[in-house]
Image (spheres, rainbow, N blue to C red):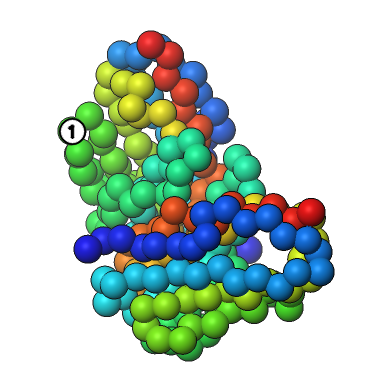
Amino acid sequence: DTEVTQTPKHLVMGMTNKKSLKCEQHMGHRAMYWYKQKAKKPPELMFVYSYEKLSINESVPSRFSPECPNSSLLNLHLHALQPEDSALYLCASSQEGSSYEQYFGPGTRLTVT
Amino acid sequence: GQQVMQIPQYQHVQEGEDFTTYCNSSTTLSNIQWYKQRPGGHPVFLIQLVKSGEVKKQKRLTFQFGEAKKNSSLHITATQTTDVGTYFCAGPGNTDKLIFGTGTRLQVFP
């Protein structure tokens, strides 16, 4: 099974809302990632979890809060977002670190109103 | 900081024509990975090259890793409409992160 799943597929939220994005993989991968992608741009790394510990935080604003409950799950908690945070949020996993190919989920299309 | 650039940014081709995208890194890479993202889709891993000068083929796609391990190319022979999408190269950064190239968007006209 080489699938990474993400929910929800689409999300519209107001600037005062709190919501969570969820990601799951069952490939036994030890590294999981959150990316943000704007239209016509490459994915932009936000967070890396390695062996369930946060190993990279790309200076992302605190209104984004990642969580890794176990080796298969990755969440991204959203609070008080801004309209410029509207984007496609992609989860990915890899066997270990960046030398290994990454498998991406279908993404959550987020719109902040 | 480390940068990975791709050219061209955008290319239109007629179906049946060939297509090439070039990837250049500001630093030496331990490996280069290629991904394809269809319109409205997510990046999908295509291939990884590790050795200096390595060439790999997947049907109509030919991937090459430069001798200095700072550049790479993807060549598609006889494009088809199914080849439409954005092609990204990516290489491991100094920390445990993958640095994505700027991408080349391919449009194929029937």
Residue occupying the point 29% across, 72% down: A26
Which quarter of the figure is the C terminus of chain B placed in? Answer: top left
Label 1 CA crowd tier, 10 Å (few <14, some 14–19, many 20+): few
Q: Name above or below for residue B5 compared with residue A96.
A: above
Instruction: Count all numbered tags in the image, as a single digit.
Output: 1
Where on the picture, by quarter, is residue B14?
A: top left
Which residue position is annotated with label 1?
Answer: B59
Whether residue B55 is visible to the viewer of this picture, yes or no, is yes
Specify whether residue B95 is in view: no
Image location (x, y in percent) of residue B62: 26, 36
Instruction: Name the residue located 47 percent from the left edge and 23 percent from the top edge.
Output: B107
Tell me the quarter of the picture where residue B92 sits: bottom left
B8 w.r.t. A32: above or below: above
Apparent side of residue B107 relative to residue A21 in the rendered image (left or right) = left
Residue shown at 60%/40% (left/top)? A40
Q: Quadrant of the N terminus of chain B?
A: bottom right
Return the chain for callout 1. B
Vertical relation: B94 (above or below) B17? below
| Local SS, label 1 | loop
Residue B46 locus on image (x, y percent) = 30, 47
Q: Which is more toward the observer, B8 or B37?
A: B37
Instruction: Judge by depth and name the residue closer to the eye, A89 or B105.
Output: A89
Residue type at numbered disc 1: Lys
Q: Is residue A73 above or below residue A92?
A: below
At horizontal 42% and vertical 78% (from top left) the residue drawn is: A73
Counting from the top left corner in percent of width and height, residue B40 is at: 50, 40
> Is B3 left or right of B62, judged from the image as shown?
right
Measured from the top left, where is residue B67 in percent x and y?
A: 32, 49
